[in-house]
Amino acid sequence: ATAELLELRSGGSSGEPVAVWHDLGSVRAHAAHGERDRSVWAGSLVPRRGYREAVVGLLDGADPSVHRFLRRGVIVPSREEVERRYLSADAPVAATLAELNAFQPHVIHAYGSFVEMLLAHVQASQAPFRRPALITYSSDELGEAARRSIERELGVPVLSTYEAIEAFKIGFECDRRNGFHLNVDLYPLRIEEGSGEVILSNLVNRATVLLNYRIGDLATLSPTPCSCGRALPLMSRLDGRRDGVLQRADGTPFLPMAASLILAREPGVWQYQIREVRPLHLDVDIVAGPPCDRPAAAARIAANLAHEIGGDARVRVEFVDRIERTAGGKVRRIVACSHAG
């Protein structure tokens, strides 16, 4: 019966909403499998039991929905309970910061794009920020410049997890930050040669069975194991979304990772979106902090992107206060024309 199942909706590899159903057994397993990535920091950075966690996302999104569904079939002893609070990523950043300061979580888990916005707000406003012991992120990207700033200037470790509505616990980072350790015993995963597309199966969920599913991500596997000693295969990096591949003037693809590197070289660029308005015409919106020399950065970014695209490429760069999120609460780094990818 559908009343005994949890329905979540994903954009899917095509970008069209896809309903994915999860049975209670798979959601219970999800909670248990989370101990793998939690073991990286629980008991060292954060108390093993009874800590506070703030989850910033959509209030009707996957995280709170999974938590409510899990409560149907699991009783957690009070001494083991995590005090968890869900906050909206759509609320004004200043209001969310005030809630975080009042709650004083040990762990903040959020979209990567929200972490960037939080950092930019704190840097620009010099607002007080009661720093957590750890920040974790998933769902969309966190720029390398923002991550370095959080870790070096704020002194807060940052770790990422690789998750999807179709497969909850695909991979996680350890403290070496060499990439994602892949839970291939739960979600067998391979990278298609040539295209770099991630293809996975879900061996946990019995409600919606997914085998050899193209999740829409592009990635690279590491040829060597992680120095931490874990035996799980290592994905060295996520290269972006298949639907976020721009097209050069000569018809070859310009991958999201290559575009990210151009933006990552600019100090103070916390968040960006590149939109391919039409072939060879790009609009770039940027959220930046005080270290950014905006006129110089805009000129360099426009010149470097135009050089990479080639031909008569035209690039417009504009600095904005906020980049609009998708209905799923994420920020799309690259919005390509339908011909690309």
Image: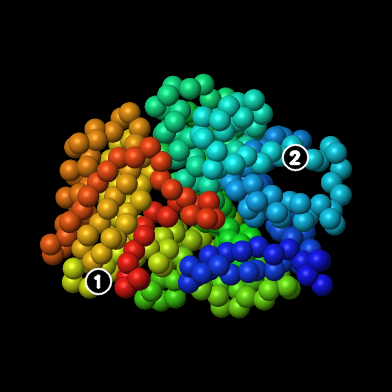
Q: Amino acid at mark 1?
A: Thr
Answer yes or no: do the residues labelled 2 and 1 have beta carbons within 8 Å? no
Task: Give amino acid for label 2.
Answer: Val
Q: Nearer the viewer, residue 21 or 258?
A: 21
> Which label's residue is closer to the chain start, 2 or 1?
2
- Residue drawn 47% across and 50% down? 325
Q: Report how many numbered discs are placed on residues in the image.
A: 2
- What x and y, as percent, mark residue 24? 79, 63
Looking at the rendered image, the quarter that the C terminus falls into is: bottom left
Residue 241's x, y, as percent? 42, 63
Residue at x-position 30% and y-position 64% = 246
SS at badge 2: loop
Q: Residue 247, percent across and down? A: 26, 67
Q: In which quadrant of the rendered image does the N terminus lie?
A: bottom right
Residue under pointer 2? 82
Q: Nearer the viewer, residue 180 or 29?
A: 29
